[in-house]
Amino acid sequence: MSGDIVNLLGLPRAELETFVADRLGAKPFRARQLMKWVYRRGVAEFSQMTDLAQDFRAQLGLVAKITVPQIVTQQQSVDGTQKWMLAMDEVQGIETVYIPEPDRGTLCISSQVGCAMDCSFCSTAQQGFNRNLSVAEIVGQVWLAHREISEIRGDGRSITNIVFMGMGEPLANYRNVVPAMRIFLDDLGYDLSRRRVTLSTSGLVPQIYKLAEECNVALAVSLHAPNDELRNELVPINRIHPIAELLKACWHYLEKQNGRSVTFEYVMLDGVNDKPEHARALARLLRGRPAKLNLIPFNIFPGTRYRRSPAEVIVQFRDILNEHGVIAMIRRTRGDDIDAACGQLAGRVRDRVVTRLGARRGHLHSSVQAS
Ligand code: SAH
């Protein structure tokens, strides 16, 4: 690696300290200064890092750079939600969404170009899968959004929560997602508390166990069905890791990480998984457990065969769960006029390495093993 110009964006603190020591003979505090410039102040040019010695900056420029993704398009919803399409190379694009609320600002980030999980109700799944994002590409989404939003709002404290609910299955890109999360949590990085960084997964059980040992963040799980027969159809990874196994992994995660609860996401599909008996079956699964349910009204996209459950059906579903002692909330739809709502992110996925049908068999297995 000597001789390479290294992209410092996303390098965890310990690695950055080693880098400045090995390549520049500098003390660890130089790494800490660099982190403050890059993440707190959002500066990517070494020449602007004015409290670093001139010659250190010059040396740094010879061995390192800070490369951030390029914005292809930016759209704003009537509700204030922002969506950016970011170029990952000449042909691929991923999407990042910022959702402002009175008391918080949530950034929804992507972990892969496309997705191989093939969930039947998700727009990203229709695109197929191209590749994992690097740590720099994951952290770069936050860096860019931070800069863009600060410009719009004129303050620096605009991103209070980060959720891996954009394109891709974060646990299938474990190797890059975990170091990125460390930057989100680091007090010299984005300094977010572990309850404000949420990893959402379709249910890669072995990686949930691994995460329980290695990184402490909030866990959200895309459940979407109360029984294996239906979940096999909606979330095909269930054929490999069925519900009982998944829930066991979730409770293990909470115990290990001393977490309060797991959020289970449940998309409301008209006539498919929204009947009172589904709500009762869900309550039997989750009653007495540290679980919250987030009911997501289905967001349509071109070519889908599903419809959104009527509002009164969703309310009734929530009420049944609450009556049976399970906390359930209805997620407010945001940004759907710019296709920025849950499951609507399509990005630009070319040169897919698997097609949708290919994903059903071969690739599911390999993404489960890749970590
Ligand atoms: N791969 C991760 C992140 C996916 S996106 C996961 O599966 O959890 C975040 C949430 O949006 C998931 O719960 C996903 O199932 C849900 N989702 C996908 N498509 C949707 C759609 N069309 N309408 C509503 N929610 C959807």
Image: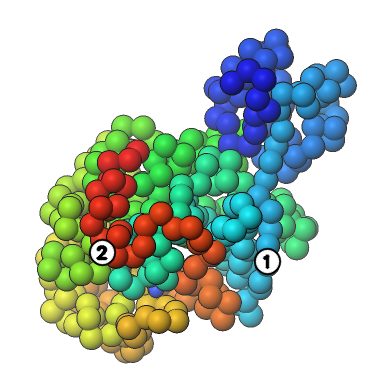
Query: Circle 2 is placed at which residue position?
Result: 235
| Image quarter of residue 307 | bottom left
Q: Position of residue 3 (x, y in %)?
A: 67, 20
Secondary structure, mark 1, is strand
Can you say whether 67 is above or below 288 in the image?
above
Residue type at mark 1 is: Thr
Q: Ligand 1 sits in which quadrant? A: bottom left
Q: Residues within 10 Å of mark 2 (few under 14, many from 20)?
A: many
Query: Which residue is depicted at the point 41% across and 54% down?
Result: 353
The label number, if any, that marks residue 58 in the structure image: none
- State yes or no: discs 1 and 2 in contact (Cβ < 8 Å): no
> Looking at this view, is 207 or 7 the one in front?
7
Residue type at mark 2 is: Val
Mark yes or no: residue 218 visible: no
Can you say whether 106 is above or below 79 in the image?
above
> Looking at this view, is 51 or 338 the one in front?
338
Q: Position of residue 295 (x, y in %)?
A: 33, 72
> Looking at this view, is 347 or 252 the one in front?
347
Can you say whether 342 is above or below 139 in the image?
below
Query: Which residue is depicted at the point 38% across and 65% down?
Result: 125
Mark yes or no: residue 71 visible: yes
